[in-house]
């Protein structure tokens, strides 16, 4: 692992990073829904493939294209990691609820651990997004950020369809 430090400036970047975080959170909400029709993994896989296709068509330089594809793969791996964190939280919550001897401190410790993991994931998502942006040229970034916005829209639509148990 290596850390990437990137300077942040301007509102457009913040909005795209925010959209990316909202999209990841939305996918996590879909993962929580026991009535979902479409597996979250399938949604994530399709969005990842779409993002990779957009980068392949937008970026001519092979080295930068490969670096950007690695960043996209990392972003989607972080989404999967977020799902695993939520699964662990739900499992621990069920265990605590079923344990007559559990205490308020047990719940507080569980939630504190979850919050710490969530913050670390948010930081990693943002750093990876910034690394992706810094690898793109000024001309390539609008296409790539538009693809990310479309992915977030697809995540929200999937969440709405699954949460309300309807298919579109």
Image: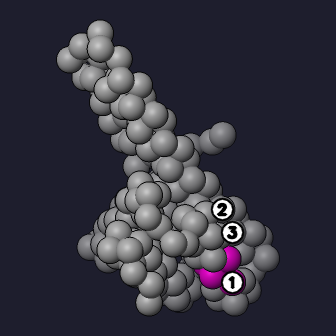
Percent x, y for residue 48? 62, 72
Q: Quadrant of residue 10?
A: bottom left
The residue that mark 3 highlights is 69
Q: Main secondary structure of the magenta part?
A: helix
Q: Which residues are magenta?
A: 48-53
In front: 56, or 136? 56
Q: Residues within 10 Å of mark 3 (few under 14, many from 20)?
A: many
The residue that mark 2 highlights is 73
Name the residue located 44 percent from the left edge and 76 percent from the top edge. 158
Q: Give the Cα distance between marks 1 and 2.
A: 12 Å
In front: 124, or 133? 124
Q: Image check: 5 left or right of 71?
A: left
Residue 111: tell me if it is visible: yes
Quadrant in which the N terminus is drawn: top right
Percent x, y for residue 29? 38, 59
Specify which label sits upstream in the sequence, 1 or 2.
1
Q: Are marks 2 and 3 in contact (CB under 8 Å)?
A: yes
Percent x, y for residue 54? 63, 85
Residue 68: tell me if it is visible: no
Q: Give the Cα distance between marks 3 and 1.
A: 9 Å
Specify which label sits upstream in the sequence, 3 or 1.
1
Q: Secondary structure at mark 2?
A: helix
- Mark 3, mark 1: which one is toward the viewer? 1
Q: Secondary structure at mark 1?
A: helix
The residue that mark 1 highlights is 53
Q: Secondary structure at mark 3?
A: helix
Name the residue located 49 percent from the left edge and 62 percent from the top edge. 129
Percent x, y for residue 58? 65, 88
Residue furthest to the top in view is 101
Q: Quadrant of residue 11?
A: bottom left
Q: Give the Cα distance between marks 2 and 3.
A: 6 Å
């Amino acid at each position: 692992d290596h850390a990437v430090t990137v300077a942040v400036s301007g509102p457009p970047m913040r909005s795209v990073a925010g959209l990316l975080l909202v999209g990841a959170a939305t996918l996590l909400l879909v993962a929580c829904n026991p009535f979902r029709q479409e597996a979250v993994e399938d949604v994530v896989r399709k969005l990842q493939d779409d993002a990779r296709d957009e980068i392949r068509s937008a970026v001519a330089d092979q080295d930068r294209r490969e670096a950007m594809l690695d960043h996209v793969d990392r972003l989607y791996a972080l989404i999967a990691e977020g799902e695993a964190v939520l699964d662990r939280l739900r499992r621990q919550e069920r265990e605590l609820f079923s344990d007559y001897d559990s205490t308020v401190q047990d719940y507080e410790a569980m939630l504190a651990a979850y919050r710490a993991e969530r913050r670390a994931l948010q930081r990693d998502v943002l750093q990876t997004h910034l690394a992706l942006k810094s690898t793109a040229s000024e001309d390539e970034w609008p296409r790539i950020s538009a693809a990310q916005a479309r992915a977030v829209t697809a995540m929200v639509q999937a969440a709405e369809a699954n949460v309300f148990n309807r298919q579109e």
